[in-house]
Image: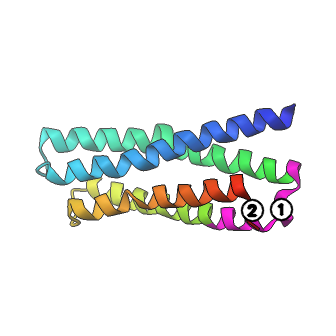
Amino acid sequence: MLYLWIKALHVISVIAWMAGMLYLPRLFVYHCDAPKGSAQSETFKVMERRLLKAIINPAMVATWIFGLVLIWQGGWYRDGWLHGKILLVLILSGVHGVYVRRLKEFAADKNTRPAKYYRILNEVPTVLMIGIVILVIVKPF
């Protein structure tokens, strides 16, 4: 029974993390169009910071904690599909780190990247999520 509760909390954490990972780069796209120092730019800075600190960071930590507990309790650590999933989640965590760096650039009014960069970056978590879900559900190896 405890395993199912941990699994539910893991899925909830993943949903929250992915929601933030998909929304933050959209904010960056719109932030690119706001003049530096404008009220609009300052509003985006607040929105981005709050999204990261209140949702994305805690959700990522919870995802990792609940996921590691599930691995241990389920004895999945020997399965090939899990190794693939962990690799993709590590890459997703790296993308999270890239988002943090970009947020700091916007916060310091030092963004030099165009909106198109953030539109492309916005697709990376989606591709990773598709791979992760396929590995978890299908367990192809």
Looking at the image, which residue is at 49% across and 39% down? 55
Q: Locate residue 33 relative to residue 132 in the image: left or right.
A: left
Task: Name which of mark 2 and mark 1 comes first in the sequence.
Answer: 1
The answer to whether 3 appears left or right of 32 in the picture is right
Q: For mark 1, does the 10 Å Cα neighbourhood hold few (<14), some (14 to 19), or many (20 or more) residues?
A: some
Residue 108 position, x and y percent, is: 26, 56
Quarter occupied by residue 135: bottom right
Residue 82 numbered tag = 2
| Mark 2 and mark 1 residues within 8 Å of each other at the beta carbon | yes
At 85% from the left edge and 66% from the top edge, which residue is drawn? 78
User: In terms of image quadrants, where is residue 15?
Assistant: top right
Between 110 and 118, the one lying in front of the other is 118
- Which quadrant would the C terminus be assigned to in this image? bottom right
Q: Which amino acid does label 1 sit on?
A: Tyr
Viewer can see residue 110: no
Residue type at tag 2? Leu
Which corner quadrant holds the N terminus?
top right
Q: Give the range drawn in magenta.
A: 73-87
